[in-house]
């Protein structure tokens, strides 16, 4: 991945790979209540959002996408002003599609 200001940025191939299934056990996240906050760590940042590795209390972990519109209310001009690689964040699981290998996350209340 490319570096910018000390932060890892995603290549197009890396973004596509994570979007198809960033790894981890997505099946463990299917029944996670969307009102429950989970601990995550920013894995990479792209113009459209951030890939966050989420770890459940039982140790199951998987990577999902927090779209830029789900980081906070209001317009975000530069996502790098909001998030950085390895930053710990609180997220909620909005949806999981095991077949497509995708998990949708939000940081909004």
Image (cartoon, rainbow, N blue to C red):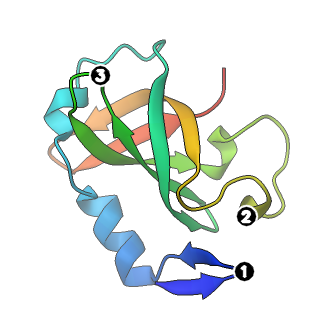
Image point (52%, 31%), residue name = 91
Q: Distance of mark 1 from mark 3, alpha carbons?
A: 33 Å
Asked whether 35 or 8 is in front, the reply is 8
Question: Is tag 2's residue or tag 3's residue first in the polypeptide sequence?
Answer: 3
Image point (54%, 75%), residue name = 8
Determine the secondary structure under disc 2. helix
Image height check: is 88 above or below 107? Answer: below
Residue 57 numbered mark, or none: 3
Q: Are marks 1 and 3 in contact (CB under 8 Å)?
A: no
User: Residue 57 sits in which quadrant?
Assistant: top left
Image height check: is 47 above or below 68? Answer: below
Q: Are marks 1 and 2 in contact (CB under 8 Å)?
A: yes
Question: Is tag 1's residue or tag 3's residue first in the polypeptide sequence?
Answer: 1
Q: Are marks 2 and 3 in contact (CB under 8 Å)?
A: no
User: Residue 16 sits in which quadrant?
Assistant: bottom left
Q: Nearer the viewer, mark 1 or mark 2?
A: 1
Q: Residue 89 location in percent, x, y?
A: 57, 38
Image point (61%, 33%), residue name = 107
Q: Distance of mark 1 from mark 2, alpha carbons?
A: 9 Å
Image point (20%, 34%), residue name = 60
Question: Is tag 1's residue or tag 2's residue first in the polypeptide sequence?
Answer: 1
Horizontal relation, residue 36 to residue 9: left or right: left
User: Residue 77 sits in which quadrant?
Assistant: bottom right
Would you call the spot at circle 1 few (<14 residues within 10 Å), some (14-19), or many (20 or more)?
few
State the residue position of label 1.
5
Horizontal relation, residue 99 to residue 49: left or right: left
Image height check: is 63 above or below 11? Answer: above
Image height check: is 82 above or below 54? Answer: below
Determine the secondary structure under disc 1. loop
Q: Residue 38 location in percent, x, y?
A: 44, 26
Horizontal relation, residue 16 to residue 39: left or right: left
State the residue position of label 2.
80
């Amino acid at each position: 991945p490319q570096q910018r200001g000390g932060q890892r940025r995603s290549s197009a191939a890396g973004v596509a790979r994570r979007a198809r299934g960033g790894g981890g056990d997505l099946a463990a996240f299917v029944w996670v209540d969307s009102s429950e906050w989970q601990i995550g760590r920013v894995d990479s940042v792209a113009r459209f959002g951030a890939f966050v590795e989420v770890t459940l209390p039982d140790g199951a972990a998987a990577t999902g996408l927090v779209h830029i519109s789900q980081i906070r209310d209001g317009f975000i001009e530069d996502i790098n002003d909001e998030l950085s690689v390895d930053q710990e964040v609180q997220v909620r699981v909005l949806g999981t599609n095991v077949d497509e290998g995708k998990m949708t996350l939000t940081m909004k209340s």
